[in-house]
Image (cartoon, grey):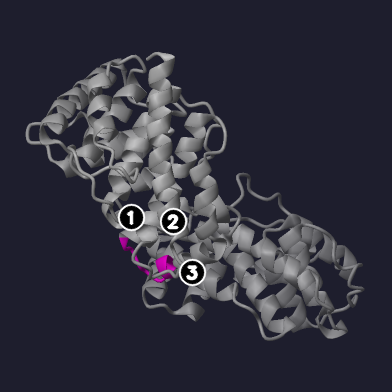
Amino acid sequence: MDGSLDQLLRLLSNRGLEWLRRHIMALPDPVPPDHPDLGALAMVGQVAPVLTGLRGRISPIEVIVMRRLTADLVRAGAVRVLEGARDDALIRLMLAGGLVARDEPLWQLACDALADDPALPLAQRLALSDDPALSARAEAVLTAPTDHPTAQDVAIRCDVLMQLCHHGARRPRLSGPRVFAVVFDNLRTLSLWAQKRGCTASVARLAFCLRLLDPDHPVADMMADMMQAQRPDGSFPARLGFGTADQALSDAVVPTLSVAMALHLGAWRRWRGAAPEWLQPRPLHAALRGLADQIAARPVPPDLALWAAASLTRAQGRDWFARLDAPRHAGPDQLAHLARLCFRDAVNAHHLRGWLRIGRGPGAGRDPAATEAAWLRGDPVTIRSDPPPALLALWQRAALRDDAAAFLACARIARHHADAPLTPPIRAMARRMAVAAMQPASDLAEALERLDRLTLLAQLLEPEMQAAAAA
């Protein structure tokens, strides 16, 4: 395309973005989580980084979205998602939440919960996970026959392909060159159907996807159909054709955003920004660090100094015993409690052992308390193989019954076994308990209990890449 056409594409795209700006700024400030246009705002938040990546500099619409898409709104939506809500607006809000809440543990936990949900549409799960099994499913969707296409079928295929390509930031990982040919032929067949049908969003998505696979593929006729349909207010209608009526945000956000993406790719031709970061959340560790920082800023009375020092050393990896001038003695019950805190953390056990001047003992026993005490003393400890099926069954039953006491008892036993993948109900229960632990505590003792609980959950659900060395 020549320079004058590029300018026209950018002009029409900017008119569409201006229409979005007016409607976004007309939303209440702050936007409540139950606002009827929340889904539209979140959709714009999803697309804004794509336009930024294609431009190679921040898109004006990304700046505008962050005027209404706030971290508080994302946190409120995350709580609802973690409680089980799955409506489309909330899911889109989570997918757009990285714009303003990338370091927010609640948002990370909500994304983690959505990635675990098999009922979620494939394109949305691809946005949350780089799991190779999802890529294989995506390839099956893209190569399926297109005998009786529908607008929904086009949306599913295009959304899946866009996610596989990161909207142009990388080539899709398909199983072979022939698969590319099949996918491309399917898209061309669908493009003929979409033009005859006159569906604006379908034509725009297909033009975008065809250019993703072949930057030189001719889409001038598709672009012309879309460009002629722009309304005087800057929006694009659901059906290709002439019209002059102004449109509401909920009515025109999908076709307007779809056309804006196609026009951007037509004008800028390729991805020019930084590669997008895949979500690799460790939400429990993030929540753990945040709570530890809060506790570290509080005054610690002498009777809680040893407990606080052990918990903070475990959470932050720094020696807190001297900082808090912790007592150098502990009774049997307190020592057993400290042994539980430092189990499978060689650094914490080393500091605690040296501070209390604990010597070697007779070796590890068979029950959990004896094994934890041996770890604290520095005696040889054997971490058993994967958790037995009976333990996992009891653990899952406790999760399904929302039995926190039984769940934590099973979690303690599971720490004596090698790290193993856990079931979705167990992970879901752990997230609920983590959210409860992140709430403000009434006193320091309660805050320390919550910190220890988060530490346990993080150790089990987000294990380190390498197992800790023996104490």
In the structure shown, which secondary structural element does the residue marked by tag 2 occupy?
helix
Q: Is tag 1's residue or tag 2's residue first in the polypeptide sequence?
A: 2
Residue 249: which disc? 1
Is residue 419 in view? no
Q: Give the residue type at disc 1.
A: Leu
Give the label, 1 or 3, closer to the camera: 1
Give the label, 2 or 3, closer to the camera: 2
Q: How far apart are the alpha carbons under marks 1 and 3?
A: 23 Å
Query: Where on the picture, by quarter, is residue 250?
Result: bottom left
Query: Where on the picture, by quarter, is residue 283?
Result: bottom right
**Which region of the structure is painted magenta?**
80-87
Q: Which residue, given by chain and number where applicable, does mark 3 sit on? A: 76
Q: Position of residue 237 (x, y in %)?
A: 24, 44
Could you classify mark 2 by the number of other residues whose Cα lies within 10 Å: few (under 14), some (14-19), or many (20 or more)? many
In the structure shown, which secondary structural element does the residue marked by tag 1 occupy?
helix
Instruction: Residue at 17%, 37% (x, y): give it.
Output: 241
Q: Nearer the viewer, residue 104 or 194?
A: 194
Q: Which residue, given by chain and number where applicable, does mark 2 sit on? A: 24
Is residue 38 in view? yes
